[in-house]
Image (spheres, helix red, strand yellow):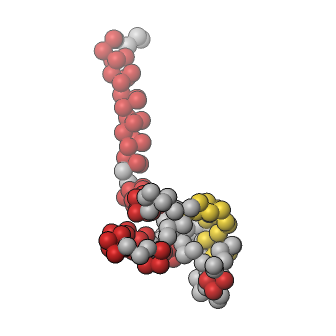
Amino acid sequence: MQLTFQKRLIRFFFMPISLLATIMMLNFSSNFNDIAQLCNRRNICYSYCTSDNFPDLSCSDVKMNIEYNGNAFENFFVFPNPYIESVDEFKIKYQLDDYDFCQSTIAMNPSYPFEEIMNKRQWNVHACFDSCRPEVQDDPGFSVDERPVCGDQV
């Protein structure tokens, strides 16, 4: 039995539309939205660093290895501390909010959820790490940490 043109047309449009609807439903789940917002913090901090330090462009790229709660990181940028680096009062006021926002994300690193399937790995949404590590590491999440010790920095 052959289908009529109308039935074939409905079948032709129904399959791709239902497939796209399934993908969109997965895309708009609360977990994906949370992860997207947390990952966006990296971009926000980098844009703050770039805009706050223009035209000096002192957001230098650094290569080092850090493994934190099952996630490996190797490419970083340094956000210069406006409390230390700047002597211009206006520039300090302008930069403090941006710098403090990025600095506040460091304290959130241990609190991010772990994956539901493999509980050995935390969501890879970390935006910032301190530029140095304490002499005695009090965070058990670090398995590899090549940052300099805080007292040894120049």
Task: Determine which quarter of the picture holds residue 104.
Answer: bottom left
Closer-to-camera residue (51/123): 51
Q: Is residue 109 above or below residue 75?
A: below
Q: How many marks?
A: 0
For residue 67, side relative to residue 45 (left or right): right
Which residue corresponds to the image point at 33% horizontal and 22% vertical from the top-left? 10
Task: Determine which quarter of the picture holds residue 137.
Answer: bottom right
Closer-to-camera residue (27/67): 67
Residue 126 in percent (x, y) is at 51, 66
Closer-to-camera residue (24/33): 33
Task: Determine which quarter of the picture holds residue 98.
Answer: bottom left
Which residue corresponds to the image point at 39% horizontal and 21% vertical from the top-left? 12
For residue 118, side relative to residue 2 (left or right): right
Q: Is residue 52 visible?
A: yes
For residue 123, side relative to residue 64 (left or right): left
Q: Is residue 21 above or below residue 154?
A: above
Q: Is residue 19 above or below residue 61?
A: above
Which residue corresponds to the image point at 66% horizontal and 77% vertical from the top-left? 148
Which residue corresponds to the image point at 36% horizontal and 31% vertical from the top-left? 17
Q: Quadrant of the N terminus?
A: top left
Residue 82 in percent (x, y) is at 43, 74
Residue 106 in percent (x, y) is at 48, 75
Q: Spot the residue most to the bottom.
A: 136
Residue 72 in percent (x, y) is at 64, 64
Closer-to-camera residue (136/139): 136
Q: Quadrant of the C terminus?
A: bottom right
Q: Is residue 123 visible?
A: no
